[in-house]
Image: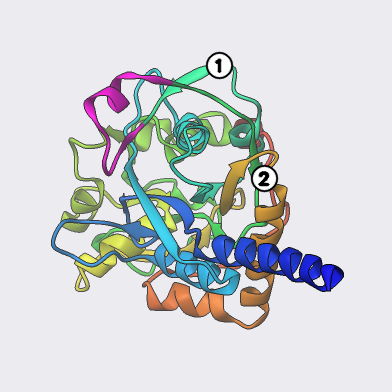
Amino acid sequence: MRAWLAAWSVGAILAATTAHAADDPLRICLDEDRPPLSAHHRGKPDAGFDVLLAQAIAQRLGRPLAIQWFESKLDEDSSPQLEANALLSDGRCALVGGYALTTDSLVKPGMKTARLPDFAGATRDDRRRRVALGVLAPSQPYVYSPMTVLLGPKVQGRKIGDIGDLAGLRLAIETGSLGDAILMTFDKGRLIDSITHLVPGRDDLLGALQRGDYDATLIDLARFDAYRAVHPDTAVTASGYYYPIGANRGYVGLAGNGELMDAVNKALAELAAEGKIAELGKQAGLTYLPPREPAILGEVWTKIIQR
């Protein structure tokens, strides 16, 4: 009788623990203004590929989903790496979605602390304080994020098979962007005289391309997806050329949370094998490309400069 009661007690405890784990939300941090990957705006339903994927992952894990929205604003004391690390280290979420998987973005931070980005529910104290940082660990990638050449209305149909094919065109690029580094360093600066630099947040790069002020630019493919969703009649077209150095995106969490990452990787593998991830990309208006090798891109800047 005592043995039966002891076994029943252990079973009850395990069942209660399992039920509690199932009730514990899967907390994922997503950028509130990165369509078509993720978008959160007052008066509108949450949308984006990463939102749909997070819902699918949580369902596979049998857990409710809680999205912690944040706003990414770069300054001299911040970066996507530090923002993600601060959110995770502060316990705002267990995973950050849509994270570019590069060696640079996963190294141990050189700073011991960092400020939190603005996030939904943040207090005045949250905006002031600094968070002790941990070490990041990635999931397997779930989407490939390339740079692509966009063409203005005056050069529609021009064949682009390499960056060198942009010679003779009026090029526009945002200062300090990855596209800026690629174009400025190509073939020892061969394109420099054709490049006009625009200021992010002040100048409208794609609007200028649409007006025919410039002939071509080099930007992230997902950004063009977002522009095309708002401007379906745009005369700006994708050339079909993808710059050969691109990054996969995946989840990132804190090192030491291996059990959760293993479960997430298992769910990602199942969803990919069933074709569900590609379907979610299409549903969100994303030009979905499956992950490519290497899973984690190393030494991005060195690769660009050497090309």
- Disc 2 crowd, CA 10 A, few/some/many (<14, 14-19, 20+): few
Q: In this figure, which residue is indicated by the disc labeled 2? A: 257
Taking depth in this image into account, of 41 and 126 the one nearest to the observer is 126
Q: Earlier in the sequence, mark 2 or mark 1?
A: 1
Q: In this figure, which residue is indicated by the disc labeled 1? A: 112
Q: Determine whether 294 is above or below 197 in the image.
A: below
What amino acid does circle 2 point to?
A: Asn
Q: Secondary structure at mark 2?
A: loop
- The residue positioned 26% from the left and 41% from the top of the image is 121
Q: Of all residues shown, which one is farthest toward the front?
A: 1
- The residue positioned 31% from the left and 66% from the top of the image is 47
Q: Determine whether 106 is above or below 8 in the image.
A: above
Of badges 2 and 1, the one in the foreground is: 2
- Quarter of the image for residue 62 reads bottom right
What amino acid does circle 1 point to?
A: Lys
Q: Is residue 35 magenta?
A: no
Taking depth in this image into account, of 267 and 281 the one nearest to the observer is 267
Q: Of all residues shown, which one is farthest toward the right?
A: 3
Q: Which residues are magenta?
A: 117-130
